[in-house]
Image (cartoon, rainbow, N blue to C red):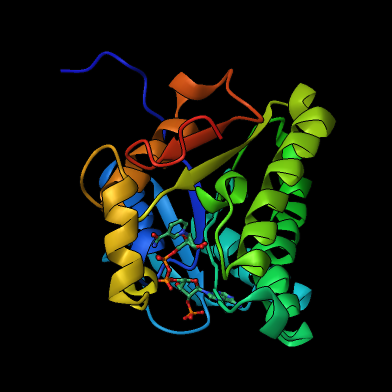
Amino acid sequence: MSQVETRQRNVLVTGGNRGIGYAIAAAFVDQGDKVVVTSRSGQGPDGAYAVAADVTRSDSVDAAFTEAEQWCGGPIEVVVANAGITADTLLMRMSDDDFDRVLDTNLAGTFRVARRASKSMIQRRFGRLIFISSVVALYGSPGQANYAASKAGLIGLARSITRELGGRGITANVVAPGFIDTDMTAALPQAQQDAYLAAIPAGRFGGTKDVARAVTFLAGEDAAYISGAVLPVDGGLGMGH
Ligand code: NDP
């Protein structure tokens, strides 16, 4: 039996109704934490409390946190900003709307969630912020200028928060998944999926649990001195970037 001290935490996962966010929420439920998932639709895994929220609206994020805190009986201590969208197309065809809505959800949405969470984290002098980025943040990806820019922005966000709040017991880290088997990647053309597979040293796509394990590690006591880090979960796809 493990002698490592475990403590139940109040956890909020955005985009927890499917894919990577669902697996992350399930992993926290499995280890005994109180877990709230947010998304615009649907439910999270068994044992998690679901709140409808849209990360593109500050009032919606604020209301979701208030409801989450009531259900948990205390402030949110661990936040996983996972909600994200794509609107892939080549640069010359990318509309202002394609660019704006991806940045608004992926980058500004994470900012809204982190800002709301930071208030009680600062008071309690404890907090874990974990942002789900992507290998393409630093690797680049044709047809994903908007998405890659949004995911790269998360690194600047996490590192600035680390410098601002690192002395208050708050860590902010980035997880950068590679190609993970979910609805988002199933929508990619077969030729693009084949090209990615050929480039992955591990020789396989990742599973959602591969990402969830990295996230629970960063939220746990063993990661207390890790902040501003970018943790790749990509089978080696992005090495050197
Ligand atoms: P999915 O498309 O399966 O899930 C996206 C989630 O985000 C859903 O829960 C969706 O719920 C939620 N969401 C989208 N827009 C909003 C919004 N405005 N407000 C609140 N929630 C929203 O994606 P994945 O599980 O594949 O990806 C999860 C994260 O991991 C994303 O940030 C993605 O960029 C990142 N990622 C994924 C990789 C992969 O290979 N799959 C690789 C690298 C990174 P709803 O639509 O109901 O609101």
**Eyeballing the image, is 23 above or below 227?**
below
Q: Residue furthest left?
A: 1
- Please give the name of the residue rendered at 81% of the width and 28% of the height, measured from the top-left corner: 163
Name the side, left or right, on which 198 lies relative to 238. left
x, y percentage for residue 103?
71, 69
The x, y position of residue 225, in whole percent, is 59, 17
Residue 156: x and y in percent read 75, 42
Q: In which quarter of the view is residue 170 placed?
A: top right
Decide which of 197, 214 is in the foreground and name it: 197
Q: Position of residue 86 (x, y in %)?
A: 54, 74
Which residue is at a point 50% across and 42% down the rendered structure image? 175
For image coordinates 55% across by 21% down, the residue present is 224
Does the rendering let one see residue 150? yes
Figure check: 102 above or below 163? below
Q: Quadrant of residue 183?
A: bottom left
Pick the front one: 22 or 236:
236
Query: Vertically, is 182 above or below 135?
Result: below
